[in-house]
Amino acid sequence: MEWFWFWLSVLPIVLGNASEQKIEDSVVLESTADLSVTVVPIESQDESSSQESIAVSGVPMSPVEQPVTSETIRRQRIERCLAIYYTKPIDANRLRPWSLMHGLIGYGLDAEIYFDGQPINAISYLCSNGSGDKLRLLELVNQQQFRTRQGPGVQGHPGQLLAILAQAGASLEQPLMVDGRPFSVQDLVTYEQKQCRARTELTFMLIAFSNYLDPKATWASQTGEKWNMAKLLREELNQPIQAGACGGTHRLMGLSHAVRQMERHGHPLAGEWLQAARVLEIHQQQAWKYQNSDGGFSTNFFQGPGNDRDWSTQLYATGHILEWLLFTLSDEQLADERLNAAVDHLLMLMLDAPNHQVDVGPRGHALHALRLYEQRVYGENSDCRQLVEAGEPYQPAITAQPLKHLKLIVAGGNADPAAKVAGKPNALERNGAKNTNNRTTGSRGFRRR
């Protein structure tokens, strides 16, 4: 009987607790029923597959962090490199026109130089026949004609100014001013056409005319000799590549511009242009064949393997070869990892250069290579004015870094004899750029122009 009364007393308590638990469970279920579960697709990096994550709507999701890829880092380093050197324009009060032209190569229409304490547009300055260390590129012959100056500190090659203006994007209508007389880039083209002579260096004229003339253009030289683009190209094809300036890269660049001209006008490659395309392909293969394991190109250019320990010599070779390749390669070839390795090596050389002081010639071609990479891989060039770090002042490049172990592969006068460090001639001067001892040969016996 006692057990009966015991169970009779506790049974309501047990039943009540169970009922309360059921009510609590139903409350929880009802509260969660108001929330919806959403499947959110997240694209993977290569966009070839996707994964799913579940998020409860009404609860803000944390942003998905994109992985830092080597390509992301490479682009950031390119932008930083271009910004750093943009704040170091060539000083026209100290360096000669040869250096000013190379200051234009890297940044094109956006390039600036330093004059009387102020940065100014490089093309405007050069096309106004501005001086560099009191030297000028152009001079009047009479009131209707002018001529270019060639030699140490000015043009190192026939047609060099016109070729650099063409690569920078200057139009035929771009005004030129010579001793107060108005001309235009078109007048400079006409002048250079008259200077064409067989069996001479025509590399830079080929670069310029491939940008400014029609492939079927014809003209006569000052001596009455008949010329056209096919003949101009044939003259360059008959010259050894390695005998061209800077390891042959400028001659190859001329051939590349000629081929690009035909493609731009929709003409099939035939005759001299087809031969030029084959020469370009052969030298592309040689560039890859002799590429060093660190990504840099051979310091012997196309003559064989070479990996000089001097960073400035590596910069000289890698900058020139990479610049040419980036102009020449097809869109499909831009995905080649060997190309990315070369870009990374060039960035390392430029960013690790002491005080970012680099000889103006190699510097200009290296920066041009990086700008070409930006343009072709990313589809745009970075705005260096916006990229310049806050508080980083303009520090004009008034000297050139001495190239202690530079062995010039070929001649060509591609040096600025005005560039000195601590009053001592730089390596380019020592290798024959400045004829202080009546010498006209470079370190390997090639005659300088």
Image (cartoon, rainbow, N blue to C red):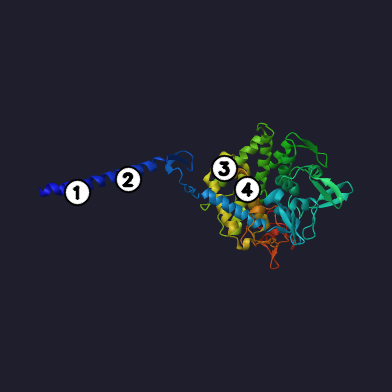
Secondary structure beneath disc 3?
Answer: helix
Crowding at mark 2 (Cα within 10 Å: few <14, some 14-19, many 20+): few
* Residue 115 spot, x, y in % from top left: 76, 59
Q: Residue furthest bottom?
A: 422
Q: Residue at x 56, y 39 (%)?
A: 332
In front: 342, or 413?
342
Of pointers 2 and 4, the one earlier in the residue sequence: 2
Q: Circle 3 is placed at which residue position? A: 334
How far apart are the two marked residues, 2 and 4, measured between alpha carbons?
A: 73 Å
Give the numbered dot on residue 24: 2
- The residue type indicated by label 4 comes to Glu
* Residue 370 spot, x, y in % from top left: 62, 50
- The residue type indicated by label 3 comes to Leu
Q: Circle 4 is placed at which residue position? A: 323
Q: In front of the other: label 3 or label 4?
A: 3
* Residue 119 spot, x, y in % from top left: 73, 57
Q: In front of the other: label 1 or label 4?
A: 1
How far apart are the two marked residues, 3 and 2, measured between alpha carbons?
A: 65 Å
Crowding at mark 3 (Cα within 10 Å: few <14, some 14-19, many 20+): some
Give the numbered dot on residue 331: none
